[in-house]
Amino acid sequence: MIRLSRSPSLTRLGPGERYGLDVLIDQSRLLVVDDQDADVVTLDIVPSDAAPDRARWAAGEWGYTISDGRVAVAPATIVHVTNVAGAVMELMSKAQDRHQRPLASSNPLVQLGLERQPVVTQAAAALRAAVAQAAGRRPVRYLAPWPDGKRWAAAFTHDVDVVAGWPAFTALRLVELLRKGELTRANRVLRAALSARRTNPAWQGMVDVLAAEREAGVVSTWFLLCGTPTFATMRAGDLTYSPDSLTVKRLLDALAAAGCEVGLHGSFATYNNAEEFLQQRRRLEALGGAAVGVRQHYLRMWPGKTQRAMRWAGFSYDATYGFADRNGFRLGVADIVPAWDVSGLDEVPLIWMDRALSKYRGIEDPFVWVDDALELAAAARAVDGLWVGLWHCNLTPPLGYPGAPEAYGRLLTEITRREPYIATLDRLVAWRRARRLVRARSVAPDGRVELSDPTVALDQNR
């Protein structure tokens, strides 16, 4: 437990520093006490000559000063948290790729070679340890990391990019494989496509993913495109199907029966267009999707600008913050955090996706993709965090990905074997919002606490 100091250095924090401090405390799971008379550790902000620079902070020199009953945080530390978790450095960069996305090189963790470590969540864990050290005989309480006594969480998500017209996608994929010299794999794809010519392998891929998840006891979140396709959007690889098609209606019925969540896969036109976001959201809702969350197609967004348009259109969370060309912790967290400077919007960072490896890294073995996913899941698990993965349901042999369905089965088996809390993104966001608001109204002399929300448990495994 901690009590926030009433010193001027803390009460006069600017918006950026306040955001960083709030994220740090939230990530630490330290229970904040409203009772100013309670004998608990006090947290303060104190300038320090030894304040860590960005490289030292990211390497584990967090900038905490510990004394009896008190932990002081260097202002530079919370600035670093804001810059990473709030994507401030990316927002300030002007460098873009051909899809108008910030270059990965503008991310401070990529610059330091630390994007595969959840450094902000690690800094919060270090704060938790510092408070325990400063407490002495004072009571220390933490909030539970996840519901049902689970120590970490995992979420499976799917972007629905292909519904109809699958031969065109197979042809494009064959060209991609041939350019890479993957002749054996291309031959396997061609044989599978010829065998499936009287069927719709895009639909079968979705059915197979749902069946595999049902067997594993997993519920997932699916993001659907909801604009009107044109020749131009199809040529650009953007809107490729009508959300009013019979196949999409069948899919929505199957997702509802499985208890899955449906969110919006924002098209290219939504990049900074709030009205287009709103129209596509309403169209999805009319089809039966909940549409509280959104993920941009191709992860195409500009930090801040796109998120403000999302929030204006009524979305409560964004699941876009992942790297397109690599996997890792783009915001430095294995968790859910509020969006910087966009009130009411939560960020659910994407930690891993299949195509970051096959498309951008040239790795064609689906089982190697899974190894990469499990490595990042282990990093999230080590900090009691959240792993969010993206598996494209069109990864089937006729569409260009032999071995992919079997690899996804292995991913499901290996993740569930490690016993995470698994839920749809909307449920995870709702629970994290509730936990973020919990406070201790009072602390009894024997250390018992009265919580503002008794439905959120304390951590019994400290």
Image (spheres, rainbow, N blue to C red):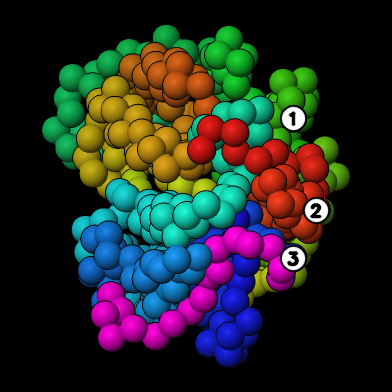
Q: Quadrant of residue 415?
A: top left
Residue at numbered disc 2: 452
Q: Are marks 3 and 1 in contact (CB under 8 Å)?
A: no
| In front: label 3 or label 2 | 3
Question: Residue at (29%, 28%) from the top-left corner?
Answer: 371
- Which x, y percent locates residue 292? 74, 50
In the rendered structure, which segment of residues is drawn in magenta? 36-52
Neighbour class for label 3 at 10 Å: few (<14), some, many (≥20)? some
| In front: label 2 or label 1 | 2
- Which x, y percent locates residue 6? 63, 81
Can you say which quadrant of the picture contains the N terminus?
bottom right
When the figure is inspected, residue 77 is found, relative to residue 219, above or below; the finding is below
- Asked whether, in this view, residue 435 is left or right of residue 93, the answer is right
Q: CA distance from mark 3 to mark 2?
A: 12 Å
Magenta region includes residue 3? no
- Which x, y percent locates residue 116? 30, 49
When the figure is inspected, residue 183 is found, relative to residue 35, above or below; the finding is above
In this orientation, does residue 189 appear?
Answer: no
In this orientation, does residue 372 appear?
Answer: yes
Q: Are marks 2 and 1 in contact (CB under 8 Å)?
A: no
Q: CA distance from mark 3 to mark 1?
A: 49 Å
| Badge 1 element | helix
- Mark 2 or 1, nearer chain start: 1
Type of amino acid at the residue the image marks with label 3 = Asp
Residue at numbered disc 1: 252
Any mark on residue 35, and which? 3
> How many numbered circles does the render carry?
3
Query: Observer-nearest residue: 139 or 85?
Result: 139
Q: Are marks 3 and 2 in contact (CB under 8 Å)?
A: no
- Mark 3 or 1, nearer chain start: 3
